[in-house]
Image: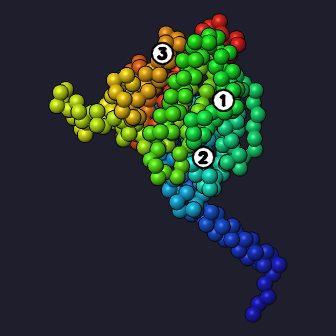
Amino acid sequence: MKKLSKKARLRIKLYNLKQLRTGLNSNVNEHTSHLAMPVKISLFNNKFRGNVLSIINKMRIKNKENKSCFIDFKKVDTLMPDGTIHFFHQLDKYPNLSLSGRASNSNIVKGMLSKLGIHQRMKLPSFEYKHLYVDRWYTMSGITADFGEEFVEIQNALQEVLQDEDSEFIVSTAISEAVSNVVHHGYASNDKYKKWVLFVGISNQRCDIIISDLGQTIPKTAPKTIGEKFQEAINFKWKEKSDADRIEFAASWRQSSTNDSHRGKGFDNIIQVQEVRGDTIVHILSRKGAWSTTSGKKSYSESVDGTIVYWSIPINSSLAAIA
């Protein structure tokens, strides 16, 4: 047999090394899903909702399969509170899901995701960025209705921007009522995960507050028996109503109207936040429906796993410098 030259042996080694690397890469790609986030992370906006929820659903599937996900935030330039907190909440629900990822090109987005701990989950270096939107994002979570000392920082921030004890009391009461609703009605008794998440974000124009849960959703836990009672009287056929109809019904049902215990009870306190500022908007999003005090009800084709109660309170121009 003819002896191979050094050059020929080197070519063979390089070829074998290339094949080995190709095999390793294909093996990694087989077990890792590449999930690219849209430019805006939002659930209210139909343009981005489907993409965000599809990514969350794929994460859930990969978690069951014990496989990993690569989350690509490169193109993300806007983090809407509703979509971002829902995504953050889902990550908390699946702590064993193996994640890696790529950071956004936006410094503000990178700063926010680092502050939320999402960069840490994706094995990315922490990124600190001094900016109003980053500095004044607050989150806390729990499984009971007792807030404890963790709520003090949030309460102080609310007092600072609202600058009125009555307004702060109304907002704090609404937060407490929304969390209590989650604790008592949001999750099934046999659910293993029962956590709620509170978010407060303060900009120079608005104070955004969110209560998130990943439970049974309002359309499933709203006062069905009450809806059924009204079927004959007002032709309200509960079983035929959309998720948006059921959310609207739950939001409009007044606590004083019944002593029954249900998910709609206590919405008075939630809606009452409108009294804090004239342009305050209340949004409620659950499953395939949404309702707000400004645009009414809206239906979607994709389903949200849980419920988001969202207040957007305008900050007076005189408070912008403080915020």
Q: Secondary structure at mark 3?
A: helix
Residue holding disc 1: 151
Residue holding disc 2: 92
For marks 3 and 2, give the one nearer the viewer: 3
Callout 3 amino acid:
Gln
Callout 1 amino acid:
Phe
Residue drawn at the location 76% of the way across and 90% of the way down: 2
Pick the front one: 280 or 7: 280
For marks 1 and 3, give the one nearer the viewer: 1
Q: Secondary structure at mark 1?
A: helix
For marks 1 and 2, give the one nearer the viewer: 1
Residue holding disc 3: 274
Quadrant for the C terminus, please.
Answer: top right
Quadrant for the N terminus, please.
Answer: bottom right
Q: Give neighbour class at mark 3: few <14, some 14-19, many 20+ (Cα, 10 Å).
A: many
Q: Is residue 293 visible?
A: yes
Q: Is residue 97 rendered to the left or right of residue 216? A: right
Q: Position of residue 276 (x, y in %)?
A: 53, 13
Q: Give neighbour class at mark 2: few <14, some 14-19, many 20+ (Cα, 10 Å).
A: some
Q: Position of residue 251 (x, y in %)?
A: 38, 26
Q: Secondary structure at mark 2?
A: helix
